[in-house]
Amino acid sequence: MKKVIHLAVLLWMGLSANAMLSQTQQAATTASKSENSSGAKSSDEVQASNVAPDYVIGADDTLHISVWKEPDLTETLPVRPDGKISMPLLNDITAAGLTPLQLRDTITDRLKKYIADPRVTVVVTGMNSRRIFVTGEVTHTGPMTLLPHMTMLQALAQAGFTQFANPKAIYLLRTESGKQKKLPFNYKEVVKGNHPEQNIELRPGDTIVVP
């Protein structure tokens, strides 16, 4: 059975190499740009222990998928812009929109056709789809991993202010239905307990500007 799986993997790799080449190059380019802009790979990658159980996988995330005692099926994969990943034997699998446990169950069910009692593990190693951006008079400018239920105040605490920052004039840029909105945030007032409605929960793609 091992030989059959190995031969099937080799055949699949040969047939799909050309189709996957451009997608792999695109994913690699995206990852390279992200790493260069952040200055450190660790800012893009989040250890599995920091990923909430209900985290929803998105495009550009990086997944490590392992199948017990099946090294040919164990690999680290980027989620393509179309939300799918490609695996030997299984071809394309939709990953975006699923939690790691849901994706694990999907892969397990499909592998049962080829392997008896497959044991699959799915780990999110790069939460690249959930990012916000912080710019202006902050110590750490650029992309920031969006943690579950992160608020404006929490993001600014992580970014830090420079000595020239104007904490009373901060604002958030958010795009909704194709239109950009500008939401004010007065740091001085919020930390005093005033205007709690300004301390909103952030969404992927939000940009915080600190004048």
Image (cartoon, grey):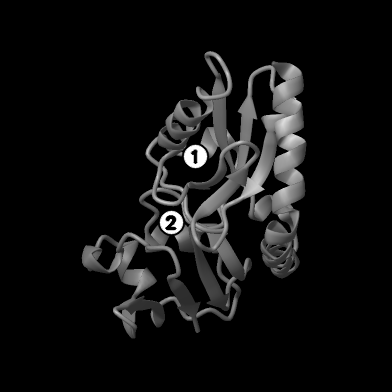
Q: Residues within 10 Å of mark 2 (few under 14, many from 20)?
A: some
Q: In the rendering, at what x and y percent does residue 10 appear?
A: 77, 37
Looking at the picture, tell me which residue is in the foreground, 101 or 34.
101
Looking at the picture, tell me which residue is in the foreground, 135 or 15.
15
**Amino acid at the residue labelled 2:** Gln
SS class, disc 2: helix
Upstream in the sequence, badge 1 or badge 2? 1
Residue at left offset 52%, top offset 52%: 84
Up the image or down, 122 lies above or below 60; here it is: above
In the drawing, does residue 82 fall left or right of residue 196? right
Task: Give the quarter of the image for residue 202.
Answer: bottom left
Task: Give the quarter of the image for residue 32.
Answer: bottom right
User: Which quadrant does the N terminus fall into?
Assistant: top right
Q: Is residue 126 visible?
A: no
Q: In the rendering, at what x and y percent does residue 67 appear?
A: 62, 25
Up the image or down, 134 lies above or below 97; here it is: below
Front disc: 1 or 2 = 1
In the drawing, does residue 11 fall left or right of residue 66? right
In the drawing, does residue 68 fall left or right of residue 59? right
Distance from label 1 to label 2 (Cα)?
A: 17 Å
Report the label total.
2
Residues at badges 1 and 2 in contact (C-beta under 8 Å)?
A: no
SS class, disc 1: loop
Query: Could you say which disc has been placed on residue 31 in the image?
Result: none
Query: Could you say which disc has been placed on residue 51 in the image?
Result: 1
Q: In the rendering, at what x and y percent does residue 97 appear?
A: 39, 50
Residue at left offset 31%, top offset 63%: 199
Name the residue tied to disc 2. Answer: 154
In the drawing, does residue 152 fall left or right of residue 86? left
Q: In the rendering, at what x and y percent does residue 94 appear?
A: 46, 48
**Amino acid at the residue labelled 1:** Val
Residue at left offset 62%, top offset 36%: 89
